[in-house]
Amino acid sequence: MLLPEPTMRDSGLYLASEFYKTCDILSLCEFVETKYFKVLSSRDYRWANELTLKTAFLTLLYNDTLFIMDSERVAGRGYADLNMIIRSEMRQYKIFDMLIEFRFVPLKEAKISSEQAKNLTVDQLKSIPQMQIAMSEAKAQVTKYGDALEKKYKDLRLRKYVVVSLGFERVWGEEV
């Protein structure tokens, strides 16, 4: 519903299927930033948080044929944002188990306007202190949760990611 144009929806589904094979989180981040977030208005900021970002990615990545999709799964003594564990009958395919941790940095917290955020280079985005803190915290979380999952499931081919959003303007993702 958020992406009413069929070609845009198809592009998102294609990027998701490529992500399963290539593990290219940057293409998904760019799609969310340039397509998904463009349909949200400034009024949507009132309720914006990490869940908004996670929902955008979940709607693109949801595939219960290949994966056991799990949001907020207990991992160790915490909750992993998004787990995608390959179903046992799909393990013969060359895809990966995925673990993604999300963070949302409000524009006000970063002391930046929407227009300024749009014009940031990638290096400038990464240099914002609040973005660095969010990325660092999320990396620690995803590492901890990944270790817990690998202890629980011995045959994982786990790839871990962190995605941090600066409002609805920019999205920074990295593999850990």
Image (tube, rainbow, N blue to C red):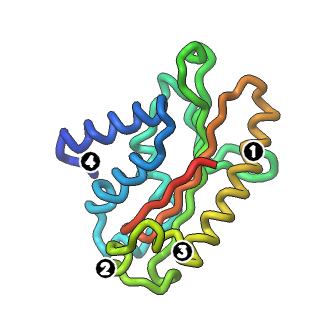
For disc 1, the marked residue is 75
Q: Is residue 105 above or below residue 27?
A: below
- Give left or right: position of 156 versus 86: right
Which of the two labelled residues, at mark 2 and mark 3, occupies the earlier sequence position? 2
Q: Percent from the top left, x then y, of residue 74?
A: 73, 45
| Badge 1: residue crowd in 10 Å (few <14, some 14–19, many ≥20) | many
For disc 3, the marked residue is 127
Which of the two labelled residues, at mark 4 and mark 2, occupies the earlier sequence position? 4
Identify the residue at image location x=44%, y=61%.
171
Residue 85 figure quarter: top right
- The type of residue carrying mark 2 is Glu
Asked if the residue under mark 4 is in contact with the one under mark 1, i.e. CB atoms within 8 Å, the reply is no
For disc 4, the marked residue is 1
Residue 115 image label:
2
Mark 2 to mark 3 CA distance (whole Å): 17 Å
Which of the two labelled residues, at mark 4 and mark 3, occupies the earlier sequence position? 4
